[in-house]
Image (cartoon, rainbow, N blue to C red):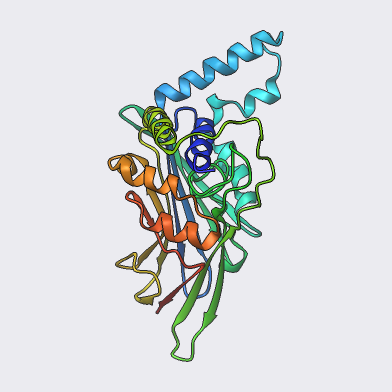
Amino acid sequence: MQRTLVASAVVALTLFFTGCLKDERTVSIKADGSGTIEIRTMMKSESIQQMIEMAKGMKEAMGGGEGDGEGEEEDGPENMFTEKTAKKKAAELGEGVEFVSMKPLKEEGWEGMVAVYSFKDITKVVIKPGSEDSPMGDDGPGGGGGGGDSSPKVIETIKFERKALDSGNTELTVITEGKEPEASTDEDPAMPEVPPEQQRAMMEQQLAMMKQMVGGLKMSVKITVEGSLVKSSSPHVDGNTVTIMSMDFDEMLEKPETFLDAAENEPKSLKEARELYAKMPGIVYHPEERTTIEFK
């Protein structure tokens, strides 16, 4: 069981195809509950090209030729950062969310896009940092993707509540819904027990693999209020912006002993998982389920 955390992360993070992804989401909100969502996504150019070649090879192996499978190609890796892709994302962000604009991005060794969406009611907005979005969700440390569903999911869905205060200020509540770990019932009696020292060595090898796969991996979700931020229950405040979650995998792996210690103390509950990951280097995260932000 102690190996589950790192093993799940290794298997799941391969879904990022070497993990070379940057995904920054900023929700900007006005006092009336309207606002915008900016999603800035980038991937290493080398990884995109590898994905394109792999998809091409799979298509050829299945007997596809030039001009075949046109519908599938629209969702292929070569079309990850297009206006059409950005427009499709609006429906995933909640009822009433509308696409506003998309701009391609290109930096040295990286390419992607920044997409902007608008909403009239923050309480209908849903952020899902899950399987294709964030290692704090389904497919990463604290998630249940790839290696099974027994591990807790620290953040599965982010929702919002808003109310007007007697003072005239507005209070926004950010709700990070997670998932409790499921009881593991698939123990293999034929699997020999591994001594603790060997487990540690195995995890160190897996960690070395992760360093190669997830170089440059960064994820974040931030809330920016229009006006003046009065107070927040979260300590992660910078001006009128509150960081709900942020993860820099390069920074996490600068202190591998901390990561390995966490893996050896696999959390048995959602509460334990949240407290554990909030203390890890490279992760900025308020462990409470509800974060309040008061602004005027």
Task: Let me know if residue 230 appears in the view.
Answer: yes
Residue 156 in picture, x, y percent from top left: 58, 54
Residue at 59%, 14% (x, y): give it: 56
Locate residue 201 relative to residue 174 in the image: left or right.
left
Camera-nearest residue between 280 and 195: 195
Residue 104, image quadrant? top left
Q: Is residue 235 above or below residue 182?
A: below
Res. 177 image quadrant: bottom right
Residue at the bottom extreme of this rendering: 166
Q: Is residue 38 above or below residue 238?
A: above
| Viewer-nearest residue: 291 or 60 | 291
Q: Name the image quarter holding the N terminus.
A: top right
Q: Give residue 51's position: percent from left, percent from top.
A: 52, 21
Q: What residue sits 47% from the left and 39% below the top?
A: 6
Residue in the picture at 41% in, 22% down = 46
Q: Quadrant of the C terminus?
A: bottom left
Q: Is residue 84 above or below residue 38?
A: above
What residue is shown at x 54% (from left), y 58% (from top)?
118
What percent of the width, then of the height, locates residue 250?
A: 32, 39
